[in-house]
Image (spheres, rainbow, N blue to C red):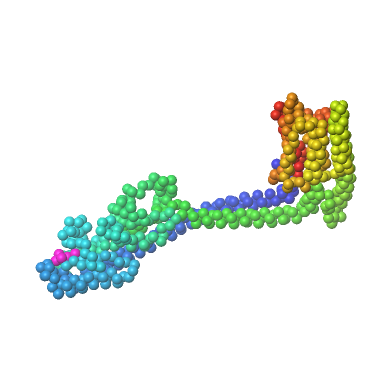
Amino acid sequence: MKIKSITLKLCLLLITLIITISIVIGAWSIKDTNKIIQVEMGKLNSEILDEVADNISIFLSNIEEIGNNIVEDNKLNTALAISKEDVEKNTEEVISLRKYVEGLLNEQVWKYGKYMKPDLYIVSENDLNCSTYSKNKYTMDSIKNENWYSEIIEANGKTVLISTFEDEEGIGPFKSIFRMGRSIKDLISGETLGVLIMDISEKMLFDRYSKIIKDGRSIYIIDLKGDIISSKDKRLIGENYFEKIKVDSYLEEGEWYSAFKRENTNYIKIESTLNKYGWSIIEEIPSHIIKQPIKQITEKFVLTLILAIVVSFIIVYKLSSWITKPVINMKNIMEKVMDGDLKVKVNVDRNDEIGNLEESFNNMIKWLDESIEEIKEKEKQKRIAELSFLQAQINPHFLYNTLSGVRFLVSMNKNEEAEEMLFKFSKLLRNILPRASELITLREEIEIIKAYIELQKIRYPKSFDVEIDIEKSIDNIRVPALILQPVVENAIFYSMEGENKEGKIKIVGYSNLDYIIIKIEDNGRGMSNRQISNVFNNKDSINRVGLINVHERIQLNYGKEYGIEINSEEGKGTSVKYVLPK
């Protein structure tokens, strides 16, 4: 489409230049910014994971410190050095030492407060077994065949960290536990007196990273073998991470991360190591989470760019409008004139050629307005003349048909019926002739129809029956006089055609959402589609003059969207529908 506006041409030229420069600079800036932000976001998540690893290391060190405090206690060594026979005798000394050891265990647990409460067990060679909360579940005979016990003994006094497992006797948070243990040796002889077992709920690990698990992230703590020690999904504990957590394909490797794809979702994997204990913390983050800040910054950048372009466009448009204001003003006035507003004028504030053009334009609009008003007045008079002609046409038609009926009765020597018919006819004429050119209420029009039906029943007794059903809500609408009579007349004549046939005519009126609908239906011989078409084309047929007249009078009063519609089928009757405004 060819652009003709000078303002628009100038505006588009400048704004295209601005947009092009903005897009080039913006694309380069977004790409560079995204790269920087992605690196920084990755480093930030890596640092957070390192902090979690440090926190867990401190947690494990504190538990290890608990073990050191217990194992190095002199009185504990004294208690475990008693012979097994003396322990079995349960002397007062043994009872006192047992209470001391249990107190030592509980004191160390509560020393670190509510954030860390491992279950501690002393399992000794002399069977002086003690535990926190007095719940012994280990004996030397029950643990000596366990692999983890061998690891503790072989460590020769060093703390051994045993990966998480499911404790069959554990309940609640102690269903999944990991274990730290160390042997207890005589401080003088170095003989192994027993072992210290520290059972810690896996929940203690989970609580240290649970707050950062959000937005689809997953965190796993694994040991050197790759077995999962802690996870949000407790069903995975004990499974091998590299075997259980399948990866479809690795996409790239970075300094601080690796990217992979699993189940049609891209992930970023970050790993941190607990160097002292050989555990690793793996965090899997959906790529869209890492890129979310990038997306937000990009969106804000784009919005800012769009805003800048919009502001630039406004400024450019204002500048262009100021330059081309006189021409634009004339164009706007012309558009109003084209929309039908002939009262507008151009403000003449210039003495040059454009001022002369504006003055000539104002004179032209004034002349055009006067000419249109003159044409409207002529059209109004023409419409009134057409209505008068149509009304004058219907009256002789109505008179002819009625008087024809009177003549028929006289010819049949039914003088009394003819006299009664003339009497009612003259009475009806007195009511309708003075008002024939007026709009009357639908109720008055129905009264006229009832009087006309009585006239025809005198001429054709027991030959037809008429049923009238008009909604009360539309009684007072105003309609042109005698719009129903011509259709009722045709319905009466057509419905009686045929041997021994009683005519049935129904007149109904109702209101729908948009229109007033009146229907006149008969059970006469009906019409073909060609005959229906001729109703509106052949004005010479006396039976069709009324229908054409009614249709044209309705349209002259209300407009082309109103009038009558005919639906008919040969042998099955005819329905004439009036469509009137509400």
The residue shown at (82%, 45%) is 440
Residue nearest the viewer, comparing 43 with 581: 581
Residue 538 x/y as whole percent:
81, 29
Residue nearest the viewer, comparing 20 with 435: 435
Q: Quadrant of residue 104?
A: bottom left
- The magenta stretch is 123-127
Depicted 235 relative to depicted 518: above or below: below
The residue shown at (17%, 65%) is 124
Residue 424 x/y as whole percent:
85, 38
Q: Quadrant of residue 434?
A: top right
From the viewer's perspective, tell me whether residue 213 is left or right of residue 426: left
Task: Point out the image quarter for the N terminus.
Answer: top right
The residue shown at (36%, 54%) is 233
The residue shown at (74%, 31%) is 503
Residue that sits furthest to the left in the current view: 85
Q: Quadrant of residue 300?
A: bottom right
